[in-house]
Image: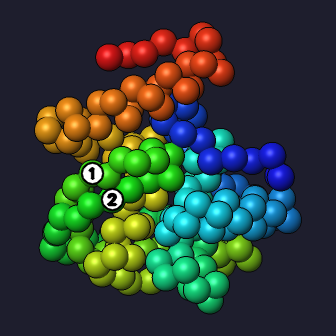
């Protein structure tokens, strides 16, 4: 658990479809605790399990940085989307990149907690945005997929640097573009 790290683009594990969590046990609770450590260390507001190389449907958020606002969502299901707005997003797997993303403003969340109990929440604005960003990770979707042509151009150098850094430690990896 201690050797878990936040994976960075273009690690292919960030692109996998994550499988439902079937067992909520002490190992999973340890994983979640480690994810909170990593998220805080990088001053993030959300982190999805595939970002630490665990392709399971689970993410954590903390929109304020206060420990009492830690939230865990296991097997999350988003529904009842209402309204949309656009705002800049960053991602711990894509340092130094921001992308303007259109998201639903209001959502309903159904998920399991660390005891396996199903619960429901509603959110709008910032929290709803974080939910959608993290939920995208469970489907292998990254903010680079939502870039405009102009944003792609502006981020080209940074993306190239991330790709070179990954290729340096994974010699078999081939750039797609
Ligand atoms: Zn992210």
On the image, numbered disc 2 is attached to which residue?
89
With 94 as the anchor, is 168 left or right in this view? right
Residue 52's disc is: none
Q: Looking at the picture, how far across and down is residue 149, in whole percent?
A: 14, 35
Is ligand 1 closer than 8 angstroms to the Cβ of mark 2?
Answer: yes
| Label 2 environment density (alpha carbons within 10 Å; few <14, some 14–19, many ≥20) | some
Placement of 97 over or under 75, stated as above or below: above
Residue in front for this viewpoint, 176 or 43: 43
Is label 1 in a helix, a strand or a loop?
A: strand
Colour setup of the view:
rainbow
Is residue 19 at all visible to an observer of this figure?
A: no
Q: Residue at x 44, y 29 (%)?
A: 161
Looking at the image, the residue that sits furthest to the bottom is 68
Quadrant assignment, res 166: top right
With 177 as the anchor, is 11 left or right in this view? right
With 175 as the anchor, is 34 left or right in this view? right
Q: Looking at the picture, how far across and down is residue 112, in whole percent?
A: 60, 72
Q: In which quarter of the image is the C terminus?
A: top left
On the image, numbered disc 1 is attached to which residue?
99
Q: Residue at x 58, y 86 (%)?
A: 66
């Amino acid at each position: 658990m201690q050797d878990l790290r936040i994976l960075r683009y273009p690690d292919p594990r960030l692109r996998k479809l994550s499988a439902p969590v079937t067992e909520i046990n002490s190992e999973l609770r340890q994983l979640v605790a480690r994810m909170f450590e990593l998220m805080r260390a990088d001053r993030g507001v959300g982190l999805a399990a595939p970002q630490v190389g665990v392709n399971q449907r689970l993410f954590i958020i903390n929109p304020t940085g206060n420990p009492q606002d830690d939230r865990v969502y296991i097997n999350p299901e988003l529904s009842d989307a209402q309204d949309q707005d656009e705002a800049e997003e960053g991602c711990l797997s894509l340092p130094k990149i921001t992308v303007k993303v259109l998201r639903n403003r209001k959502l309903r969340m159904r998920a399991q907690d660390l005891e396996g109990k199903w619960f429901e929440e509603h959110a709008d604005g910032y929290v709803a945005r974080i939910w959608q960003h993290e939920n995208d990770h469970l489907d292998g979707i990254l903010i680079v997929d939502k870039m405009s042509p102009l944003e792609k151009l502006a981020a080209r150098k940074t993306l190239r640097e991330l790709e070179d850094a990954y290729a340096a430690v994974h010699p078999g990896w081939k750039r797609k573009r």
